[in-house]
Image (cartoon, helix red, strand yellow):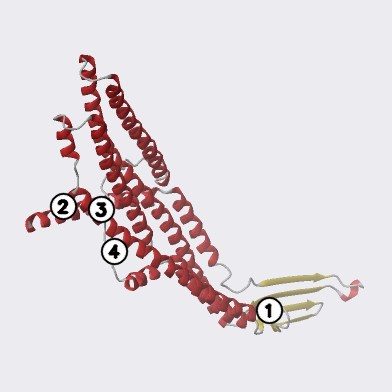
């Protein structure tokens, strides 16, 4: 008995690893071929270049004047000057720090988009797995319905059964056939969606094994990792840091600016040349900018606290849901295997112990239970996918 349990556990583990590897292979292809991610990557790279602009001093100013004298006897005058202005020295340091933080934010935006694309891909793969395994079950059911329909067609031709029994077998075959066709329609629609996610490249996803992975019962430990990997929360944290650096930059911009350079003045018989220096007194231009930056930093701290609270409560609810679904699936599967009467029904029907109506009714209960189990497994995997979006 222990050996059988051990073998079953090893088989389940192997199936789970196989299913997970199949989805991981799809995710690798989608990340490589997805056109949205490709366009977003280029946009982020351009944005990072833009964040590196404006970090250096302003352009130097070169001025040349040629003035005609009147009366002409006094001659002409020539002026030439070169000037360079500078912000307060600490401003350049803060500009560079803000630029680096914005580039990190840009990468977080790409990471957020990547997570969304891969999450959508996982959802499609889970749904495809459901329709793939449902196709397998419906194919078995169709084969059985075909066998019954053929048998009753033969019996009807020999007069062993009436038209009512014959029609009943044919309607059962028709229903199963249409169920299989509808299943294929849904499956093809999901395959098209997966192809779109893969940049138009076809992926023939035929996996029919659900990956029933367990999750840690300790929510707090699991949540700590999810919070650390959530790009939105990281983005908000970076925005707070940017606001704080912006306040310091605005303070530096409120300090005097300097300029210096060379100046030359030349008239008939005389020439003056030397250095020129000056200072800009910031009286009105940067009014309230420091106050605004500090207020924005405080506001972003409130946004961060709210985002963390919303994320925590959402993940807590999903974690509870996944554990409940996991327990339900395991319980339902074990009891369905224990109470499966499909083989006994077929034997009883072949021996004539039950009628076609009884056989079809009892078998429909089993199929309904099987479909319910598959739906539960799909819902569990969808919830599990949502829960591990940031793992």
**Residue at the spot 26% in from the left edge and 19% down from the top edge:** 162
| Mark found first going from the N terminus, 4 or 2 | 2
**Looking at the image, do the residues carrying marks 4 and 2 touch, with CB atoms under 8 Å apart?**
no
Label disc, if present, on residue 286 of the rendered structure = 1
Viewer can see residue 84? yes
Label disc, if present, on residue 215 of the rendered structure = 4
Q: Is residue 248 above or below residue 180?
A: below
| Mark found first going from the N terminus, 3 or 4 | 4
Label disc, if present, on residue 332 of the rendered structure = 3
In this rendered view, identify the residue nearer to me: 37 or 358: 358
Tell me the mark number nearer the camera, choosing from 2 and 1. 2
**Gap between marks 3 and 4, in whole Å?**
19 Å
Q: Is residue 177 above or below residue 99?
A: above
Label disc, if present, on residue 11 of the rendered structure = 2
| Mark found first going from the N terminus, 1 or 3 | 1
Residue 359: percent from left, percent from top: 23, 34
The residue at the far right in this view is 71
Position of residue 355 in the picture relative to residue 113 (left or right): left
**Gap between marks 4 and 2, in whole Å?**
19 Å
């Amino acid at each position: 008995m222990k050996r059988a349990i051990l073998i079953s556990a090893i088989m389940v583990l192997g199936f789970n690893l196989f299913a997970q590897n199949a989805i991981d292979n799809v995710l690798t292809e989608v990340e490589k071929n997805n056109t949205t991610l490709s366009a977003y990557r280029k946009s982020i790279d351009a944005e990072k270049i833009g964040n590196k602009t404006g970090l250096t001093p302003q352009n130097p100013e070169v001025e040349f004047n040629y003035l005609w004298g009147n009366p002409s006897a006094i001659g002409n005058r020539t002026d030439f000057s070169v000037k360079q202005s500078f912000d307060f020295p600490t401003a350049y340091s803060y500009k560079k720090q803000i630029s680096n933080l914005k580039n990190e934010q840009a990468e977080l935006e790409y990471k957020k988009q990547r997570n969304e694309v891969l999450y959508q891909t996982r959802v499609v793969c889970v749904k495809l797995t459901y329709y793939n395994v449902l196709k397998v079950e419906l194919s078995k059911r169709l084969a059985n319905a075909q066998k019954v329909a053929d048998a009753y067609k033969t019996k009807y031709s020999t007069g062993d059964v009436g038209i009512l029994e014959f029609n009943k077998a044919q309607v059962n075959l028709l229903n199963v056939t249409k169920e299989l066709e509808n299943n294929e329609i849904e499956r093809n629609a999901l395959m098209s969606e997966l192809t779109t996610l893969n940049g138009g490249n076809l992926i023939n996803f035929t996996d029919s094994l659900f990956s029933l992975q367990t999750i840690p019962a300790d929510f707090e430990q699991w949540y700590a990792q999810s919070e650390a990997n959530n790009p939105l929360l990281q983005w908000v944290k970076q925005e707070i840091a940017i606001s704080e650096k912006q306040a310091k930059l605005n303070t530096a911009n409120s300090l005097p600016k300097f300029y210096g350079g060379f100046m030359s003045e030349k008239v008939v018989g005389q020439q003056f040349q030397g250095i020129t220096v000056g200072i800009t007194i910031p009286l009105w231009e940067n009014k309230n900018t420091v106050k605004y930056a500090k207020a924005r930093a405080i506001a972003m701290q409130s946004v961060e606290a709210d985002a963390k609270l919303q994320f925590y409560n959402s993940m807590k609810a999903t974690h509870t849901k996944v554990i409940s679904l996991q327990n339900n699936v395991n319980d339902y599967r074990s009891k369905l295997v224990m109470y499966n009467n499909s083989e006994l029904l077929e034997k009883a029907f072949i021996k004539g112990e039950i009628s076609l109506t009884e056989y079809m009714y009892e078998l429909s209960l089993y199929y309904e239970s099987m479909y319910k189990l598959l739906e539960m497994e799909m819902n569990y995997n969808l919830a599990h996918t949502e829960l591990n979006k940031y793992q």
